[in-house]
Image: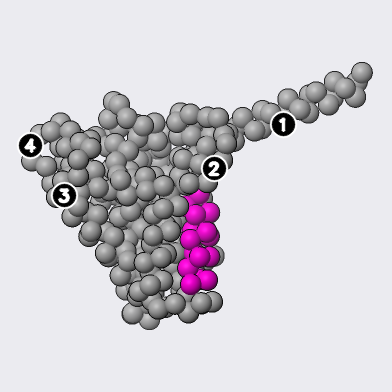
Amino acid sequence: MMEKDLGQKNDVNNVNRLDDWRGFLGLISFSTVLPINIHTNIQEMAKFTWLWPLIGGFIGIIIGGFAWILVDLLHLPSLSSAALIYSLAIYFTGFHHLDGLIDFGDGIMAHGSPESKINAMRDKRIGTGGLGALLTVSLITFAAIASIPGTYIFPAIFLSEVTAKLGLVTCATFSEPLDDGTGRFFISNMNLKFLLASLVISLILGFLTLKLTGIIIIISALVAGSSITIISRRNFRKATGDVLGGTNEISRMFSLIILVILIVWGF
Protein backbone atom coordinates (compact mmCIF):
# COMPACT_ATOMS: atom_id res chain seq x y z
CA MET A 1 0.00 0.00 0.00
CA MET A 2 2.86 2.36 0.92
CA GLU A 3 4.60 1.66 -2.41
CA LYS A 4 1.36 2.41 -4.24
CA ASP A 5 0.94 5.70 -2.37
CA LEU A 6 4.53 6.69 -3.14
CA GLY A 7 3.98 5.85 -6.80
CA GLN A 8 0.84 7.97 -6.95
CA LYS A 9 2.66 10.83 -5.21
CA ASN A 10 5.51 10.67 -7.74
CA ASP A 11 2.99 10.72 -10.59
CA VAL A 12 1.38 13.83 -9.13
CA ASN A 13 4.78 15.52 -8.76
CA ASN A 14 5.65 14.71 -12.36
CA VAL A 15 2.35 16.19 -13.53
CA ASN A 16 2.99 19.32 -11.46
CA ARG A 17 6.45 19.72 -12.99
CA LEU A 18 4.92 19.38 -16.46
CA ASP A 19 2.30 21.98 -15.58
CA ASP A 20 5.06 24.35 -14.41
CA TRP A 21 6.76 24.17 -17.81
CA ARG A 22 3.65 23.83 -19.95
CA GLY A 23 3.72 27.54 -20.70
CA PHE A 24 7.36 27.40 -21.78
CA LEU A 25 6.68 24.51 -24.16
CA GLY A 26 3.64 26.40 -25.40
CA LEU A 27 5.85 29.44 -26.07
CA ILE A 28 8.16 27.26 -28.17
CA SER A 29 5.15 26.09 -30.15
CA PHE A 30 3.90 29.68 -30.45
CA SER A 31 7.32 30.83 -31.67
CA THR A 32 7.88 28.10 -34.26
CA VAL A 33 6.04 25.81 -36.67
CA LEU A 34 6.95 22.78 -34.59
CA PRO A 35 3.84 20.66 -33.87
CA ILE A 36 4.17 20.53 -30.08
CA ASN A 37 0.83 19.34 -28.75
CA ILE A 38 0.67 21.37 -25.56
CA HIS A 39 -2.67 22.51 -24.16
CA THR A 40 -1.97 25.95 -22.73
CA ASN A 41 -2.93 29.60 -23.20
CA ILE A 42 -1.29 32.96 -23.83
CA GLN A 43 -1.31 33.85 -20.14
CA GLU A 44 0.73 30.77 -19.25
CA MET A 45 3.13 31.33 -22.17
CA ALA A 46 3.64 34.97 -21.24
CA LYS A 47 5.06 34.00 -17.84
CA PHE A 48 8.13 32.76 -19.71
CA THR A 49 8.60 35.84 -21.89
CA TRP A 50 11.98 36.48 -20.29
CA LEU A 51 13.20 33.12 -21.63
CA TRP A 52 12.45 34.06 -25.23
CA PRO A 53 16.17 34.62 -26.04
CA LEU A 54 16.79 31.02 -25.02
CA ILE A 55 14.12 29.91 -27.48
CA GLY A 56 15.82 32.18 -30.00
CA GLY A 57 19.01 30.21 -29.39
CA PHE A 58 17.15 26.99 -30.13
CA ILE A 59 15.79 28.50 -33.35
CA GLY A 60 19.29 29.75 -34.14
CA ILE A 61 20.73 26.25 -33.87
CA ILE A 62 18.19 24.95 -36.40
CA ILE A 63 18.64 27.82 -38.88
CA GLY A 64 22.38 28.05 -38.26
CA GLY A 65 22.80 24.33 -38.88
CA PHE A 66 20.93 24.68 -42.14
CA ALA A 67 23.15 27.63 -43.06
CA TRP A 68 26.30 25.63 -42.30
CA ILE A 69 25.13 22.81 -44.57
CA LEU A 70 24.47 25.22 -47.46
CA VAL A 71 27.64 27.28 -47.11
CA ASP A 72 30.31 24.99 -45.67
CA LEU A 73 29.13 21.59 -46.82
CA LEU A 74 27.44 22.19 -50.17
CA HIS A 75 29.37 25.39 -51.01
CA LEU A 76 26.34 27.08 -52.56
CA PRO A 77 26.85 30.65 -53.86
CA SER A 78 26.37 33.31 -51.18
CA LEU A 79 23.26 34.86 -52.74
CA SER A 80 21.47 31.52 -53.12
CA SER A 81 22.46 30.50 -49.60
CA ALA A 82 21.30 33.82 -48.12
CA ALA A 83 17.92 33.54 -49.83
CA LEU A 84 17.36 30.01 -48.53
CA ILE A 85 18.62 30.80 -45.02
CA TYR A 86 16.43 33.87 -44.62
CA SER A 87 13.43 32.06 -46.09
CA LEU A 88 13.79 29.25 -43.55
CA ALA A 89 14.21 31.76 -40.71
CA ILE A 90 10.93 33.54 -41.42
CA TYR A 91 9.09 30.29 -42.25
CA PHE A 92 10.29 28.44 -39.12
CA THR A 93 8.77 31.17 -36.96
CA GLY A 94 5.48 30.86 -38.81
CA PHE A 95 5.78 34.31 -40.46
CA HIS A 96 4.31 35.74 -37.22
CA HIS A 97 6.93 38.42 -36.72
CA LEU A 98 7.08 39.28 -40.41
CA ASP A 99 3.35 39.97 -40.31
CA GLY A 100 3.94 42.20 -37.29
CA LEU A 101 6.65 44.09 -39.17
CA ILE A 102 4.28 44.82 -42.05
CA ASP A 103 1.54 46.05 -39.71
CA PHE A 104 4.07 48.09 -37.73
CA GLY A 105 5.23 49.78 -40.94
CA ASP A 106 1.65 50.64 -41.88
CA GLY A 107 1.05 52.17 -38.46
CA ILE A 108 4.24 54.23 -38.51
CA MET A 109 3.48 55.73 -41.93
CA ALA A 110 -0.17 56.52 -41.16
CA HIS A 111 -1.10 60.12 -40.38
CA GLY A 112 -3.17 61.39 -37.50
CA SER A 113 -3.62 60.54 -33.82
CA PRO A 114 -2.15 57.48 -32.07
CA GLU A 115 -5.60 55.88 -32.26
CA SER A 116 -5.76 56.28 -36.04
CA LYS A 117 -2.23 54.92 -36.37
CA ILE A 118 -3.20 51.86 -34.31
CA ASN A 119 -6.25 51.36 -36.52
CA ALA A 120 -4.00 51.49 -39.59
CA MET A 121 -1.68 48.96 -37.96
CA ARG A 122 -4.60 46.62 -37.36
CA ASP A 123 -6.06 47.03 -40.83
CA LYS A 124 -5.85 43.68 -42.65
CA ARG A 125 -4.91 45.42 -45.88
CA ILE A 126 -1.21 46.04 -46.62
CA GLY A 127 -0.30 49.68 -47.24
CA THR A 128 2.80 51.28 -48.67
CA GLY A 129 4.27 51.67 -45.17
CA GLY A 130 4.01 47.95 -44.51
CA LEU A 131 5.36 47.08 -47.94
CA GLY A 132 8.24 49.50 -47.47
CA ALA A 133 9.11 48.07 -44.05
CA LEU A 134 9.00 44.54 -45.44
CA LEU A 135 11.25 45.33 -48.41
CA THR A 136 13.71 47.40 -46.38
CA VAL A 137 14.22 44.95 -43.52
CA SER A 138 14.16 41.87 -45.76
CA LEU A 139 16.64 43.26 -48.29
CA ILE A 140 19.08 44.45 -45.64
CA THR A 141 18.83 41.14 -43.77
CA PHE A 142 19.34 39.17 -46.98
CA ALA A 143 22.33 41.31 -48.01
CA ALA A 144 23.89 41.00 -44.55
CA ILE A 145 23.62 37.20 -44.57
CA ALA A 146 25.13 37.09 -48.07
CA SER A 147 28.05 39.24 -46.84
CA ILE A 148 29.02 36.97 -43.95
CA PRO A 149 32.03 34.68 -44.60
CA GLY A 150 31.46 30.93 -44.33
CA THR A 151 33.53 30.65 -41.15
CA TYR A 152 31.08 32.99 -39.39
CA ILE A 153 27.83 31.75 -40.86
CA PHE A 154 26.71 29.43 -38.05
CA PRO A 155 27.55 31.75 -35.12
CA ALA A 156 26.12 34.72 -37.04
CA ILE A 157 22.75 33.09 -37.67
CA PHE A 158 22.66 31.60 -34.18
CA LEU A 159 23.26 34.94 -32.46
CA SER A 160 20.93 36.82 -34.82
CA GLU A 161 18.02 34.74 -33.54
CA VAL A 162 19.06 35.29 -29.92
CA THR A 163 19.27 39.04 -30.50
CA ALA A 164 15.93 39.05 -32.31
CA LYS A 165 14.24 37.76 -29.17
CA LEU A 166 16.30 39.93 -26.81
CA GLY A 167 15.29 43.00 -28.80
CA LEU A 168 11.67 41.87 -28.53
CA VAL A 169 11.77 41.44 -24.74
CA THR A 170 13.62 44.76 -24.38
CA CYS A 171 10.81 46.52 -26.23
CA ALA A 172 8.25 44.68 -24.09
CA THR A 173 10.02 45.77 -20.89
CA PHE A 174 9.95 49.49 -21.64
CA SER A 175 6.56 49.61 -23.35
CA GLU A 176 3.08 50.17 -22.00
CA PRO A 177 0.58 47.57 -23.25
CA LEU A 178 -2.57 48.37 -25.15
CA ASP A 179 -5.71 47.28 -23.32
CA ASP A 180 -6.53 44.53 -25.82
CA GLY A 181 -4.62 42.12 -28.06
CA THR A 182 -2.30 39.24 -27.21
CA GLY A 183 0.76 41.46 -27.02
CA ARG A 184 -0.40 42.93 -23.71
CA PHE A 185 0.26 39.64 -21.90
CA PHE A 186 3.92 39.51 -22.96
CA ILE A 187 4.45 43.20 -22.19
CA SER A 188 2.80 42.96 -18.77
CA ASN A 189 5.01 40.01 -17.80
CA MET A 190 8.28 41.85 -18.44
CA ASN A 191 10.14 44.11 -16.01
CA LEU A 192 13.73 45.19 -15.39
CA LYS A 193 14.48 42.13 -13.26
CA PHE A 194 13.34 39.76 -16.00
CA LEU A 195 15.13 41.82 -18.65
CA LEU A 196 18.36 41.50 -16.67
CA ALA A 197 17.88 37.72 -16.55
CA SER A 198 17.27 37.66 -20.32
CA LEU A 199 20.36 39.80 -20.87
CA VAL A 200 22.56 37.53 -18.74
CA ILE A 201 21.42 34.46 -20.69
CA SER A 202 22.03 36.26 -23.98
CA LEU A 203 25.45 37.57 -22.95
CA ILE A 204 26.56 34.08 -21.95
CA LEU A 205 25.44 32.71 -25.32
CA GLY A 206 27.14 35.62 -27.09
CA PHE A 207 30.44 35.20 -25.26
CA LEU A 208 30.52 31.43 -25.74
CA THR A 209 29.84 31.90 -29.46
CA LEU A 210 32.04 34.83 -30.53
CA LYS A 211 33.71 36.10 -27.35
CA LEU A 212 33.84 39.95 -27.27
CA THR A 213 32.28 40.22 -30.73
CA GLY A 214 29.36 38.17 -29.49
CA ILE A 215 28.88 40.48 -26.51
CA ILE A 216 28.76 43.50 -28.83
CA ILE A 217 26.19 41.74 -30.99
CA ILE A 218 24.03 41.04 -27.94
CA ILE A 219 24.26 44.65 -26.78
CA SER A 220 23.09 45.75 -30.24
CA ALA A 221 19.76 44.05 -29.48
CA LEU A 222 19.25 46.35 -26.48
CA VAL A 223 19.86 49.33 -28.76
CA ALA A 224 17.42 48.04 -31.38
CA GLY A 225 14.71 47.15 -28.87
CA SER A 226 15.02 50.47 -27.04
CA SER A 227 14.93 52.40 -30.32
CA ILE A 228 11.73 50.70 -31.45
CA THR A 229 10.24 51.45 -28.02
CA ILE A 230 10.89 55.17 -28.52
CA ILE A 231 9.43 55.08 -32.04
CA SER A 232 6.40 53.15 -30.80
CA ARG A 233 5.73 55.57 -27.94
CA ARG A 234 5.88 58.57 -30.26
CA ASN A 235 3.47 57.02 -32.73
CA PHE A 236 1.12 54.82 -30.68
CA ARG A 237 1.85 55.70 -27.02
CA LYS A 238 1.26 52.02 -26.26
CA ALA A 239 2.66 48.84 -27.81
CA THR A 240 0.95 45.84 -29.40
CA GLY A 241 1.96 42.40 -30.57
CA ASP A 242 2.67 43.88 -34.00
CA VAL A 243 5.22 46.23 -32.44
CA LEU A 244 6.91 43.28 -30.75
CA GLY A 245 6.89 41.28 -33.97
CA GLY A 246 8.41 44.16 -35.90
CA THR A 247 11.07 44.55 -33.21
CA ASN A 248 12.02 40.90 -33.64
CA GLU A 249 12.71 41.36 -37.37
CA ILE A 250 14.47 44.71 -36.99
CA SER A 251 16.68 43.44 -34.15
CA ARG A 252 17.79 40.47 -36.24
CA MET A 253 18.61 42.76 -39.15
CA PHE A 254 20.48 45.24 -36.94
CA SER A 255 22.63 42.56 -35.28
CA LEU A 256 23.63 41.06 -38.64
CA ILE A 257 24.64 44.48 -39.99
CA ILE A 258 26.70 45.16 -36.86
CA LEU A 259 28.43 41.81 -37.29
CA VAL A 260 29.24 42.55 -40.95
CA ILE A 261 30.74 45.90 -39.90
CA LEU A 262 32.84 44.23 -37.21
CA ILE A 263 34.10 41.64 -39.70
CA VAL A 264 35.03 44.33 -42.23
CA TRP A 265 36.88 46.25 -39.52
CA GLY A 266 38.74 43.04 -38.57
CA PHE A 267 37.41 43.16 -35.03
Q: CA distance from mark 1 to mark 3?
A: 49 Å
Q: Which residue is mark 1?
A: 14
Residue 233 disc label: none
- Identify the amino acid type marked 2: Pro
Residue at (38% x, 81% y) in the render: 266
Q: Which residue is mark 4?
A: 112
| Display colour scheme | one colour
Q: Secondary structure at mark 4?
A: loop
Mark 4, Cα crowd under 10 Å, few <14 / some 14-19 / many 20+, is: few
- Identify the amino acid type marked 4: Gly
Q: Is residue 207 left or right of residue 165?
A: right
State which tag comes first along the sequence, 2 or 3: 2
The x, y position of residue 226, in whole percent, is 29, 49
Q: CA distance from mark 4 to mark 1?
A: 54 Å
State which tag comes first along the sequence, 1 or 3: 1
- State which mark lies toward you, 2 or 1: 2
* Residue range corresponding to the magenta coloring: 55-70
State which tag comes first along the sequence, 2 or 1: 1
Q: Which residue is mark 3?
A: 129
Mark 2, Cα crowd under 10 Å, few <14 / some 14-19 / many 20+, is: few
In the displayed structure, 173 sits above or below 214; it is above
Residue 35 disc label: 2
State which tag comes first along the sequence, 4 or 1: 1
